[in-house]
Image (tube, grey):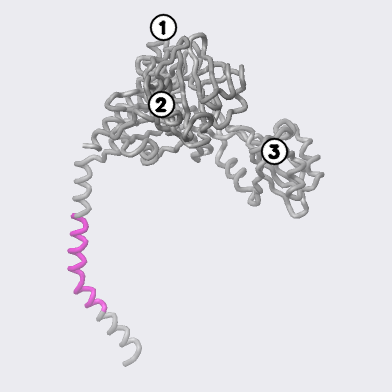
Amino acid sequence: MNYNTFINKDLRKRNISTEKHHPVLRWGLFAAGCIAIGAVIANTGDSDPDNTLQTELLNINESVNNSTDFTRLSQPLALPENPLTPVEISHTENKFTNWENITVKSGDSLSGIFGRIDINASQLAELMKISSVKKHLLKIMPGEQIQLDHDFNGQLLGLHYDIDFKTSLLVERSPAGLASTIIEHNIDARPHHATGIINDSLFLAAQEAGLTDNMTMELAGIFGWDIDFVLDIRKGDSFSLVYEEIYKNGKKIKDGNILAAEFINRGKSFRAVRYEDPKTKKTAYFSESGKNLRKAFLRSPVKFSYISSKFSNKRYHPVLHKYRSHKGIDYAARRGTPIRSSGEGKVIFRGKKGGYGNVVIIKHGSRYSTLYAHLSKFNRKARRWSKVKQGQIIGYVGSSGLATGPHLHYEFRVNGVHRNPLTVRFPSAKSISKQHLASFRADTTHLFAQLDVLNRNQLALNQ
């Protein structure tokens, strides 16, 4: 049998084999097509809850974007008029492939940094002839980042330095010498949302919702005047929030401000929206009625601790072994935990005070004063007669004085009389004035509407 005869015979065998399997292939394709059509029909009948949520939120945002009334801080940040073009971004990021990242140390100067990485001293003299370099790099601060590129001969090829969040200084070498460019970055704030239900702790629920610890602390800070996050949190409590994600040249770099939030504690809803008061020009969080959520005092001076001893007229003292009144609240916490001033005021005492150990006493106006005892050490910035802001760290938890373990003893006094810090009524900060209330409601309605959508979706998922 010659070669051609063998080939023809082999082809005839393959054709016969293929023809035998054609019916099977056809029925298989027909079945696959039926399955695909059925999937399409099923998807058109049952809508995806996540897609429904996104659609509702987009509809709200579109209605806002089509209006010219909403111009306050609750809106996402506007794009710069002259954003950095994609060509410029590629140029600044990719031209230099041997960037050396330098973290400025205490006492550092450009001269010291150049010497440390073997850049010739002559390069510094050439660099300082550029006015923008002299303006921004003469006083570099510890912790700042500088990127440098140089060749084997110690010649400077490039320098990159972030002047601030929005602008950078870029120095490049060309045949004509060193030249600088100020780069304006494209900063974009995009609204995002998150919801969660507390089963174990606020932090765990927030992590499951995709929130960072910093965002969780900010959320707790917004409602910290009305909710004690040490005592009041219960399983089943929930939260919803709309916040900004900050993008730089199209890449997310951090979370921005919380625009609106709701916390449901023991079935009671607390709502807040970020807004700039037209009268005071200060940004704060307000309720739907325009009431400022901020109070003159924090409910707890120690974040996320627990109460080991409550306010009582008769308590057994663990050191003195006898019953006596306990005119404050004891917060058990690890040694070194920061202690915050519960209100704005002036430090009138800082030192040792008998069984209290290390003590700080702060006067708040003419009526109120607070006492913080058993500190391990003081914050050197909170000296006697110095003014402190609400939330400022004044010291750290310890066990000085008559104490069996590290904790903070906290007292609150009104006109010199001890009051229970957990139940005393705190004065509120200024709310939205009546003349600006209509404008406030118009500017924040869409944010509260988004919270309504998030809550409906949360309920639907739990049913």
The circle on residue 259 is none
Q: Is residue 33 left or right of residue 160?
A: left
Q: Residues within 10 Å of mark 3 (few under 14, many from 20)?
A: few
Residue 116 lies, in percent from the top left, at 74, 48
Q: Amino acid at mark 3?
A: Ser
Q: Quadrant of residue 348?
A: top right
Q: Is residue 366 left or right of residue 206?
A: right
Q: Amino acid at mark 2?
A: Lys
The circle on residue 106 is 3
Q: Is residue 349 left or right of residue 285?
A: right
Q: Earlier in the sequence, mark 1 or mark 2?
A: 2
Q: Is residue 130 left or right of residue 20?
A: right
Q: Residue at x 39, y 40 (%)?
A: 207
Give the magenta part as a residue range.
14-34
The circle on residue 435 is 1
Q: Earlier in the sequence, mark 3 or mark 1?
A: 3
Q: Is residue 71 visible?
A: no
